[in-house]
Image: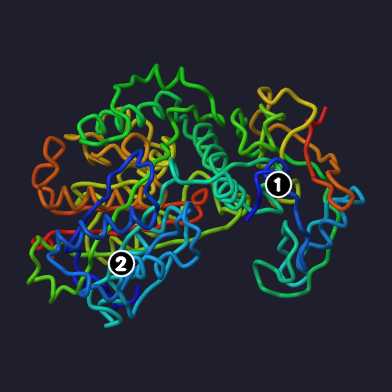
Amino acid sequence: MSTKTIRGKAAIIGAGTSPLGKVPGRSPLWLAAEATKQAMADAGLEKGDIDGILCGHSFASPFHRFSIALSEYLGITTTFSNNYQVSGATAATMFNTAAAALECGLAKNILIVGGDSLFSGLTPELAMRSMSESRDQQYEMPFGIPVANTFAMTAHRHMKEYGTTPEQLAKVAVVHRKHAIKTPGAQMTTPITVEDVLNSKMITSPYRKLDCSLISDGGVAFIMTSADRAKDSKSQPLYILGGGECYTHEHIFLAPTIVSTGAIQSSKNAYAMAGVTADDIDFAGVYDCFTGTVIMILEDLGFCGKGEGGPFVEAGEIELGGKIPINTHGGLLSHCHPGVPGSLLHFHEAVKQLRGQAGEQQVIGAELSLVHSLGAGFATQATTIIGTEATL
Amino acid sequence: MISPQQAHLKPTPTPDADSEQLWKGLKEGKLFLQHCEDCGHIQYYHQAICRHCLGENLVEKEASGKGIVYSYSVVYRAPGPAFKNEIPYAVVLVELEEGPRMISSMVDIDPELVEFEMWVEMVVAPISEEITLPRFRPVV
């Protein structure tokens, strides 16, 4: 492991969101811009202070260079700008890279932002494009394999090897709904039971409708700055303590294994850099595109042993008061999933938890958060560890 | 950008400089794997270099076409209009006898009867003049 580090070098000083859920009549650029305005207000910065910008891919936007288009929309000129595309893992990669860029002097204040309108904004053409481009055209898509199917096959094999049950998958959905019900503005707020999940329509086995995440609109933004500048911030700065990433394959059939993931390596690197272990983490944001994804990733992040994810969830360990409360906002499964902004919402919840602003869902005394983003049938994995000043 | 009309057509592979030989073999009813003469690595799909040692000493050998179902998922909700008439269908992650895995889909079986470790064999399914897909059926 390299001795170079981003530990404590940069901090999140602003966070904001646009209206979330179903937001008709608003473009991805507006959603991103609105979230940016909220994040700037939170940080106490003006638009002229922003000199760097990192964005995720926006399916409903016709712009190839979303970060550049957004700078123009906001009327700013930047000296550091890029659009990242590692699917769902993009969120954590933006925080890791922004910390490095700030430490190396490429920018002073970096805007991390995503805006997309998967629910309201996709024209039939853009919807088809997003669907057809998600998997490889030669060796996967001709067989009618939606991206959901790659996640389904991994969960299916996990069930065979470790005895993970449909009821345990369902419990993940039930917990997320329970959390969403307590979150103002969540998209899904009707309580559900394990039976409701098991009785919902089969989509791609073993996943039923309620095992799958939502389709939403929304924008989410953060401002990051160097640790030195963060001291003068209007808001409570939250420090990046560690980052790690791992990319193992493009095609699901070339994944080294389908019952564990590159999250083992990405989190190992992040823990080592932060100088903490899984046991130290107070709150985790865990990418929850499907219920089984959460079970596998809890294992790979080290919150429980391999194959123990199902019983761990069943025992209530991911709820408030459990060993590791996760996604206390309701996650992609029940709160909101507008694509890349969806995984940025895990960071937004981490910020609320660390600032003690999570209300009824507050993890008492939360100082240390881990957020894990992933995508593309477990091909892309990225972990970020964030802490309060006390953890420096 | 594709049009809604095109969305009703199934995605058709476009052979490239790496994959031309693979698709040519399938057209003749043969599934070829690449064997690396330098390190012994066997790979699906075709590319100009070995994925293990990066050597270029690759020879193609016909696969037996047999393997087991390593994992699967039965699709009940089609990914777009082109597959609507086919649901439910079983997408399989096949582990070939020679080692490499590949994605395909099953024919000649009720998709709900597909099982882990089931022995399957390749059948060729032409979808156009140029392209033949490798699909699988149970070994009886």
Q: Please tell me how crowded label 1 is: few (under 14), some (14-19), or many (20+) other residues with Cα within 10 Å.
A: some
Q: Report which residue position mark 2 lands on.
A: A74
The residue closer to the viewer here, B116 or A115, is A115
Which dot, 2 or 1, sits closer to the camera?
A: 2
Q: Amino acid at mark 1?
A: Gln
A174 relative to B113 in the view: left or right: left
B108 relative to A340 in the view: left or right: right
Q: Chain of mark 1?
A: B
Q: Position of residue A12 (x, y in %)?
A: 20, 63
Q: Position of residue A311 (x, y in %)?
A: 35, 30
Q: Please tell me how crowded label 2 is: few (under 14), some (14-19), or many (20+) other residues with Cα within 10 Å.
A: some
- Within the image, what quadrant is residue A196 found in? top left
Q: Residue at x 85, y 42 (%)?
A: B124
The residue closer to the viewer here, A346 or B34, is A346
Q: Position of residue A254 (x, y in %)?
A: 61, 54
Q: Residue at x 45, y 46 (%)?
A: A121
- Within the image, what quadrant is residue A189 found in? top left
Secondary structure at badge 2 equals helix
**Numbered mark located on residue B6 in the image:** 1
Residue B104 drawn above or below residue A242: above
> Which residue is most to the bottom?
A105
